[in-house]
Image: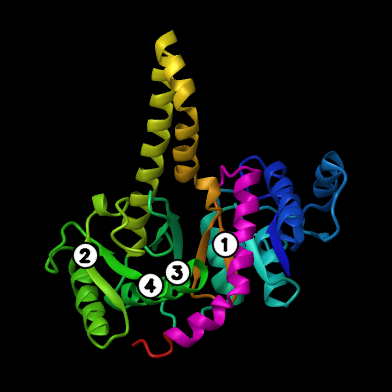
Amino acid sequence: MKIAIDAIGSDARPVPDVQGAVDAVREYGVEVLLVGPEALIRRELDKIGNLPDGIHICNATQEIMMGEHPANAVREKKDSSIVVAVQQVKKGNADAFVSMGHTGANLAAAVLHLQRIQGVHRPALGAMFPTPKGPALLIDVGANTDCKPEWLEQFAIMGELYVRAVLGIDRPRVALLANGEEEIKGNQAVQQAHARLQARAAKGGMNFVGNIEGKDVPAHLADVIVADGFVGNIALKTAEGIAKMLNELLRSEIQSNPISMLGGALAMPAFNKVKKILDYTEYGGAPLLGVNGVVIIGHGRSNAVAVKNAIRVAKRAVETNILETIRSGVTAVD
């Protein structure tokens, strides 16, 4: 299996991108195609040294910066790392694409060059939301800010198929994220999507559990949580901010006096376990569902561990043949 990596995607590029790719080759047995300025990539590989087999380079001379308009940049910068990497998937030179770069540009490049799966209204970006009982998939988290009811229904279908295939949950619980549990809560799109999903569940086609509120997401009351990209992105980023704040508060309080430091040292194994559960780097990246290719998009602030785990997610998606699963699962959606 060969996975194309945007070697200059992260904020600290190319260090974590290249190191994470090398670590993935060692740990997961995949091949990687590092896409970006060849000289820059080779310098970083030389620093790492003792490289395993399976590392390839594909030269790309341009870079899409965070401030650029996504669609315009993708059309104008045809030799950018994002566009060239996506093209490798389209040409069959790579089985998947992983990037920690400009989310909008990654979305635009995937839709423009890989195109949507037939029958898919809008591709959706899913993210694994950590909970004490295991991760849940939150979809959409930023690809579509204004959604129609049928799009939300389709996000639910694609999310359910992904969780079944990748997480191995036979009958995942699917819910809509709303401002109340009652079916009359939410805006008009959410209310109409609720009716559509309820009808689908009545036919035995989905384990739809209704609406859940924001507080129910970390309680893991659903395995797939459906929202428009505006709401989903805010929910995800708020949770990430709270997790970071709690971690900083705990560290500050533990270091505040000798007694707290002693107690903190004794409780360190438990703290580390909790930190691992809440650490976004453990989940790698978010799958873009609905395009004709496996695309995983991660945080710009990703370190090498996050890049390595994003490649693991891509590998798992390819192994489970998620594309064919979604193709067959969305054909009957109006």
Give the residue drawn at x 38%, y 25%: 249
Q: Magenta region: which residues?
A: 300-329
Q: Is mark 1 on a helix, strand or loop?
A: strand
Indicate the position of residue 267 as horizontal and vertical percent values: 44, 27
Q: Foreground mark, 3 or 4? A: 3
Q: Which labelled disc corresponds to residue 235?
A: none
Give the residue drawn at x 35%, y 44%: 238
Q: Label 4 is placed on what type of residue?
A: Phe
Magenta-colored stretch includes residue 314: yes
Residue holding disc 1: 296
Q: Foreground mark, 3 or 1? A: 3
Earlier-in-chain disc, 2 versus 1:
2
Q: Is residue 184 left or right of residue 131?
A: left
Colour scheme shown: rainbow
Q: How far apart are marks 1 and 4 (CA)?
A: 16 Å
Label 1, residues with CA under 10 Å away: few <14, some 14-19, many ≥20: many
Indicate the position of residue 250 as horizontal and vertical percent values: 40, 25
Earlier-in-chain disc, 3 versus 4:
4
Does the rendering let one see residue 69?
no
Earlier-in-chain disc, 3 versus 1:
3
Residue holding disc 4: 155
Earlier-in-chain disc, 1 versus 4:
4
Earlier-in-chain disc, 2 versus 4:
4
**Front-lying residue, 181 or 6:** 181
Residue holding disc 2: 211
Q: Foreground mark, 2 or 1? A: 2
Q: Distance between the residues labelled 2 and 4?
A: 15 Å
Q: Is mark 2 on a helix, strand or loop?
A: strand
